[in-house]
Amino acid sequence: MGNEKEPPEVLDKLLFPKIFRAFRMSIHYNSLIIGFLAVVVICLTGWVMDFSKTVVAAPGPEGGITELQVYMTSPDGVESHIENHKEVGERRGVYSTLWHFAAARFHGALNSLFAFNLPGVAANIAQYFKAVGWALRYHFVYCIILFVIKLAVISVAGGSLCRIAALQFAQGEKPGLTEALRFSTKKFLSFFTAPLAPVGMIVFIGLFVFLLGLIGNIPRAGELIMGIFMPLALIAGGLIAIVLIGTVAGFNLMFPAVAYDGSDCFDAISRSFSYVYSKPWRMGFYTAVAMVYGAICYIFVRFFAFLLLWSTRWFLLLGVWVKSSGKETNKLAAIWAEPSFINLSASTDLAAGNWSELFAAFLVQLFLLVIVGLLVSFILSFYFSANTIIYSLMRNKVDNTALEDIYTELDEVKTEPTTSESESEEPQPEAGQQE
């Protein structure tokens, strides 16, 4: 009898399979709604900001080479590209340019991952960050404004998604939409500042090294002072390296720390750094499992979306036999191009269409964008759900905290004395002293 119970007990001690619960948690309708609203707000923000078209592209029949494409191949050639085409070239928005580039890199990373081409995955990720570097270098003000808005939206949406995942994983609860949003708005300052605080630390420490460099410009005495204080500069560089590694490796744990433990900004940073440096290999293993599993889930969800669109269009096509006005094609084919697994929302050529076909194609494209938006919202939901589970597992291993232990509003109430308790604790005047 004892031998029969050993396999379940061994399996129960393995924590990493619990990451596989992230898929069911991420497809919950509350999580998808929150993710979808976040995607809509960010996209609308980018669309509005793209009215100021500042990206220079070479003229061409379908849009020529952009600044970003030049920067990716030859960073030194961007200035000449802008000079040559700023008067006669096309103009595009920064957000739309980055969006299309990031989508291509994302799918490239997934294809490389399934081909077990890890250098290809790293190359696609590196190209994305290089593109962000281009945006910061040539469109700095635009990027700062967009970044602040995106961080505010992600702070609310990501905090809500982490809270939903934490309650579901720890206690099996499924909190409502308003409850999750109320928690994230209450803890908004912690969510918003947690990713920014490490950057502030790096800048603050780097400022002292920068000042030492300025002193080095003093003739004769400058180099002597730099040589004397070089050990302090190296110590500062070591601190910057520690903070930078902890931020990159522990960034995924900051939001879950607030959602799970009700932490403030600095406590969330402290916990994420502690878990990364205490058990780096375990953290890396959990992250790798979540990435591979997430890629598989994404392919499945994308295939579901493709099958949904393809089957809908196929049955519609069976019933539509009238040709489009001005074209020798089917009316449905004129307003809705056949979707593919790679391109779910392919656009159609409506140059010769009438007003009704133009409006119908607009509605079809709008609904297709909703499907794509739900697909992106699944990615957001899975990301925060999986990292919330990883945080709970790391907390269990490092701090020996039970997986079921989670911060609730009742904990906050217990720490604050009620009015009746505070009044009872006040010294009461004796009967003889009463007036």
Image (tube, rainbow, N blue to C red):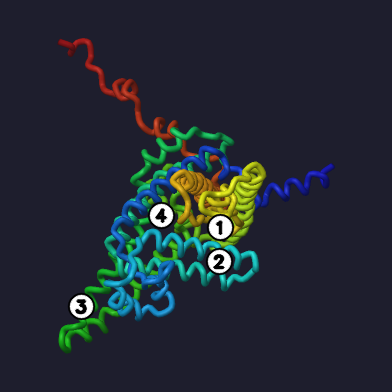
Quote the CA–CA distance across marks 2 and 3: 44 Å
- Regarding mark 3 in the picture, which secondary structure is present there? helix
The residue wearing badge 1 is 343
Residue visible at 27% across and 73% down?
209
Q: Is residue 377 visible?
A: no
The numbered dot on residue 269 is: 4
The residue wearing badge 3 is 214
Quote the CA–CA distance across marks 3 and 4: 31 Å
Is residue 196 toward the left or the right of residue 321 in the image? Answer: left
The numbered dot on residue 115 is: none
The residue wearing badge 2 is 108
Eye-nearest disc, 2 or 3: 2
Eye-nearest disc, 1 or 4: 1
Eye-nearest disc, 4 or 2: 2
What's under tag 1, amino acid-wise?
Asn
Asked if 422 appears above or below 236 in the picture, the reply is above
Q: Is residue 421 visible?
A: yes
Q: Nearer the viewer, residue 1 or 253?
A: 253
Rendered-image quadrant of the C terminus: top left
Residue visible at 62% across and 71% down?
117
Quote the CA–CA distance across marks 1 and 4: 39 Å
- Crowd band around label 1 with a 10 angstrom C-alpha radius: few (<14), some (14–19), many (20+): few
What's under tag 3, amino acid-wise?
Leu
Residue visible at 31% across and 74% down?
85
